Image: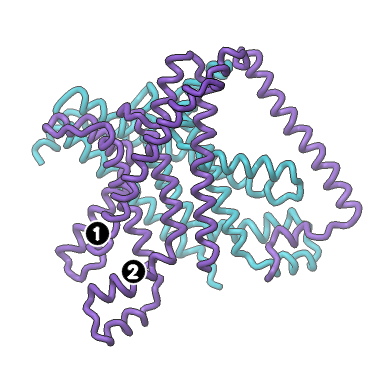
Amino acid sequence: MSRSVDDILFGAPSPQAQRLIRVVSVVAAVVLLLLAAGIVMRFHSAGQLEARHWEFFTWPSTWTFLAKGLLGTLASAAMAAVIALTLGLVLLVGRLSPLRLVRWPSIAVIEFLRGTPTLLLIYVCFLVLPSVGIKLSTYWMLTLPVGLSTAAVVAEVYRAGVLAVPRGQTLAARSLGLTEAQVFFSVVFPQALRYIVPALVAQLVIVVKDTTFGYVVTYGELMQNAKVLIANYNSLVPVYLVVAALYCLVNYAISGASKRLGRPMH
Amino acid sequence: MGEVSRLLTDHGPAFGQALLLTWKLTVLSFVPGFLLGMGVTVLRLLPLPPLRFVLTVYVEIFRNIPSVALLIFIVFALPDLNVLIDYEPAVVLTLALVCSAFTADYLRTGINTIPGGQAEAALSLGMRPLRIITAVVLPQALRTVVQPMTSLLIALMLSTSLASQVPFPGRELTALVSKIATDSAAGIPAFAVAAAMYVATGLLIAWAGATLEKKVRILR
């Protein structure tokens, strides 16, 4: 196991250097603490530390409401992920098809969905579709666009995995007399999946983040429920801070899981 | 097709301006975000545990927070702390912070691809650690991250659409579409034109990135 660059750069400093590092570390810590103290002072002078801004976080009802929002976020994210994983597979198969009539439209759909902001797709479901007589619930107004734009990205992730499977696998499977569909679905794709599990899980983080757009269509997810809490208790900063922390925790947990999944593969 | 041409005669200049604003926001947030990310990466290499810890927290926060939530916080919550930032700088700040966190993350991965022996060799030649970072480590790391940085730039370009969430003077593409869709029945053609502009911009960035990648790729 070779050491990484930064281990070597400062790996075994001389005693003087060690002393210097210790001194600078202490200075850096002091500066950072002063910075933190400055922020707390700013909160205090703006009156944001007053109990009335925070006391409702001790009430269980606040947390049940936030939990409901989080559940809404997860419900939307889970469905969007299902849409993305299945539609992504369909788009991938279309993209790999030898028939131009199938391949080109698939590429066009992938590039279109991948290249358009999710928010724009949400506005289409929210503002445009009703004018042509299609009415979706707020759940689908959020979930469908998020699922669709993720599907295109997932299709490309799948493709990277498929291309990483050694070509000999395909040739060997063909020589055994398997049909093209069998070659793909029982030999190539399962192996491709193993390569890309970390990338797929990382994509989940993006899905969870994208569901924040739920507040555009007033679907009851975490961000939308935060808005309701703010309207009720008139304290913006604490609620947004808590909600931001919740998002960071959920997404950090997901990316942490993806790193753990990624490790044994390599 | 007729609808699109009618839309373009009505709103053609507006679409041009919206596209320019989208590009402007992209560049304005990418450049400082990229430089900030590079700074964070270098500072994280220094053997100062408190600084490393804080910067790691910084990266994890801005990598995991939804951009909309960050923007809303900056625009609507910071005034309660007596910090007032205008709408356009707020959008740019949001995107730059998110961009810096991802840049730092990718550059870190890029640094990990550099064999440790190079640092040992440079040390044995008598180079100082900081000199090694700027002359040996960073140039190689930058060359390995062209591809993820291209994807990040495209994602950033698409994220400028969240400027439509604040009362911005001037409209970028998504805000323009939502305005046209609210005011008239021309929602679908407006959406199609905006989508085409986004996709074209994305393809352009991807092409530029691929060209650059081909030029600077390190063959090991």
Question: In the image, what residue type sits under mark 1?
Answer: Val
Q: Residue at x 69, y 46 (%)?
A: B43
Residue lying at the far left in this picture: please name it: B2
Under circle 2, the secondary element is: helix
Label 2 lies in what chain?
A
Q: Which chain is cyan?
A: B
Q: Could you tell me residue A184's position as x and y percent?
A: 28, 72
As drawn, B175 above or below A169: above
Question: Which is more N-terminal, label 1 or label 2?
Answer: 1
Q: Which chain carries label 1?
A: A
Q: Where is residue B147 in the image (x, y as percent from the top left)?
A: 46, 57
Q: Which residue is drawn at 50% across and 23% down?
A: A60
Residue at point 70% right, 23% down? A38
Q: Is residue B9 visible?
A: no
The one of A232 and B183 positioned closer to us in this rendering: A232
Q: Do labels 2 and 1 share a chain?
A: yes
Q: Taking A96 as reference, is A248 left or right? A: right
Q: Is residue B1 above or below residue A230?
A: below
Q: Check disc 2 and report the residue beneath it.
A: A189
Residue identified by numbered label 1:
A90
Give the quadrant of residue A97. bottom left
Is residue B50 left or right of A222 when viewed as pictured? Answer: right
Q: Would you say A55 lies left or right of A27 here?
A: left
Label 1 secondary element: helix
Q: Find the residue positioned furthest to the bottom.
A: A175
Crowding at dot 1, Cα within 10 Å, few <14 / some 14-19 / many 20+, comes out as: some
* Residue found farthest to the right: A15
Q: How far apart are marks 2 and 1 (CA)?
A: 12 Å
- The chain painted purple is A
Picture residue at 27% right of the left edge, 31% below the top: A138
